[in-house]
Amino acid sequence: ASSNDALMTSKQIEKDLLRTMPANACFSHLHSTGIPRLRRVMRGLAWLYPDIGYCQGTGTMAASLLLLLEEEDAFWMMATIVEDLLPASYYSSTLLGIQADQKVLRTLIANYLPDIDHVLVQHDIELSLISLHWFLTLFASVVHMKILLRIWDWFLFDGSITLFQVTLGMLKMRESELKELENSAQIFNALSDIPGDVDDVDQ
């Protein structure tokens, strides 16, 4: 990466530091203990993967890991996620890998949750406008921490198939409710709210 690219990446990281997890005391202001750690992890990842640079979704994941791990361990865990656990090009500028996974998700919904598929088609709802963010952050930005830890346990064991399993499971939990809603806005909002409403991962 050129020095100009590195400067732009550094500016992007800096801009997002306080937006990443503002409700958590470790990341709520510039003097919070987590902010310099998050900055170093994100800069390190951008240096290690110059073809990716900085992707906003990775910040939420890194911040979540920093609540659990030492800085160096969080960095290498992020590297493992990017290199080994997710398909190629997941965090590239084109988001090619994650876009492909959104197409796979729609096919799985059509096959395994036909009633949900009917709702999405009937109301012309593009699920990826919601679910892409779930996949991009490995659910770090949308579920409670205790749920996230369980999801990540599965993810670290089984890889990216977990993202599909969790999404299908969440949709299945709300299937009857979604079928009763009458307009696209209600359905879109209900879909967006699903992860945050999950309180028991064993439902």
Image (tube, helix red, strand yellow):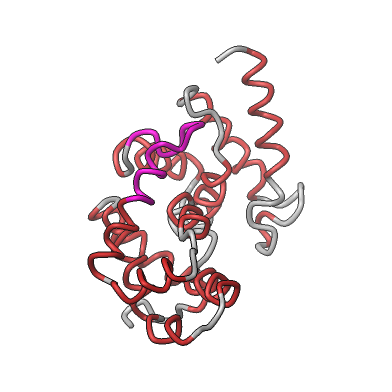
x%, y% of residue 59?
Answer: 56, 46
Quarter of the image where one finds residue 193: bottom right
Q: Can you say which quadrant of the picture contains the C terminus? A: bottom left
Q: Nearer the viewer, residue 124 or 149?
A: 124
In front of the other: 121 or 19: 121
Is the residue 118 above or below the residue 47 in the image?
Answer: below
Percent x, y of residue 65: 48, 52
In this view, which residue lies farthest toward the front? 122
Residue 79 in the image, given as x and y percentages of width and height: 40, 37
Q: Residue at 45%, 71% (x, y): give it.
A: 146
In-front residue for pair 167/71:
167
Rendered residue at 68%/21% (across/down) = 7
Above-or-below relation of 32 to 148: above
At horizontal 50% and vertical 51% (from top left) the residue drawn is 61
In the shown orientation, is residue 20 left or right of residue 49? right
168 sits to left or right of 10: left
User: Is residue 44 shown left or right of residue 107?
Assistant: right
For the view shown, which residue lies furthest in the top direction? 2
140, above or below 49, in the image: below
Segment colored magenta: 88-103
Tell me if 67 is positioned left or right of 99 in this view.
right
**Residue found at the far right of this picture:** 30
Residue 175, position in %: x, y? Answer: 38, 81
Quadrant location of the N terminus?
top right
Q: Is residue 14 magenta?
A: no
Residue situated in front as seen by the camera: 107 or 195: 107
Q: Is residue 101 magenta?
A: yes
Count all numbered tags in the image, as a single digit: 0
Q: Is residue 157 above or below residue 145?
A: above
- Residue at 68 percent across and 64 percent down: it is 23
